[in-house]
Image (tube, rainbow, N blue to C red):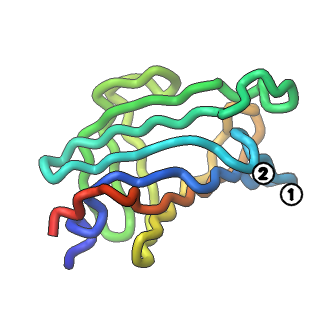
């Protein structure tokens, strides 16, 4: 199975962690974030991430909801999202490059170092598991 075929399907968010250059770590949507990402065989994808407890004051520096859709393609060990709709920064038309690792039914996306929504330089790691009813495209 190619990486493109293995990526196809629906994935549920397990963890979202930001590691800052100053050595601190943040869980922007808490210890049990909610989110789904879907990669379709036709090259379209959708991502939704939200805080299951948006009123939790310590996490208010992050938006309560992130959504975007994009055309995607695989380039080496990265998936490139060319945004077609975005509810937040970055704007529609931007390109998001995420290094990825696939290990069975576990997908890890690595966000390269950048200034986060917390206005501190850092990189993020998002871990997803394949949704039980997802089609694999195989």
Q: Nearer the viewer, residue 15 or 17?
A: 15
* Classed neighbour count for the residue bearing mark 2: other residues with Cα under 10 Å, few (<14), some (14–19), many (≥20): some
Q: Nearer the viewer, residue 77 or 47?
A: 47
Q: Is residue 9 above or below residue 121?
A: below
Query: Given contact means CB atoms under 8 Å apart, are the residues at marks 1 and 2 in contact?
Result: yes
Question: Which corner quadrant holds the N terminus?
Answer: bottom left
Which of the labelled discs sits on residue 96, or is there none? none
Q: Nearer the viewer, residue 128 or 91?
A: 128
Classify mark 2: helix, strand or loop.
Answer: strand
Q: Which residue carries the number 1 mark?
A: 23
Classify mark 1: helix, strand or loop.
Answer: loop
* Classed neighbour count for the residue bearing mark 1: other residues with Cα under 10 Å, few (<14), some (14–19), many (≥20): few
Q: Residue at x 38, y 60 (%)?
A: 132
The answer to which image quadrant residue 11 occupies is bottom left
Q: Residue at x 47, y 69 (%)?
A: 106
The answer to which image quadrant residue 73 occupies is bottom left
List x then y, in percent, for residue 86. 40, 24
Residue 134 lies left or right of residue 13; in this view the side is left
Q: Is residue 2 above or below residue 95?
A: below
Q: Which residue carries the number 2 mark?
A: 20
Residue 73 lies left or right of residue 121; in this view the side is left
Mark 1 and mark 2: Cα distance apart in space: 6 Å
Q: Residue at x 40, y 77 (%)?
A: 104
Q: Is residue 99 above or below residue 60?
A: below
Q: Residue at x 32, y 27 (%)?
A: 93
């Amino acid at each position: 199975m190619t990486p493109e075929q293995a990526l196809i399907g629906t994935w549920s968010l397990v963890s979202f962690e930001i590691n800052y250059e100053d050595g601190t770590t943040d869980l922007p949507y808490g210890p049990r974030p909610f989110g789904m990402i879907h990669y379709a065989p036709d090259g379209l994808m959708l991502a939704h991430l939200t805080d299951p407890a948006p009123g939790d004051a310590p996490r208010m520096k992050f938006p309560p909801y992130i959504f975007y859709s994009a055309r995607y393609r695989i380039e080496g060990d990265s998936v490139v999202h060319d945004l077609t709709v975005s509810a937040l920064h970055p704007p529609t038309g931007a390109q998001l490059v995420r290094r990825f690792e696939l290990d069975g039914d576990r997908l890890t996306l690595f966000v390269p170092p950048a200034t986060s929504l917390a206005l501190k330089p850092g990189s993020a790691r998002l871990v997803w598991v394949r949704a039980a009813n997802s089609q694999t495209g195989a």
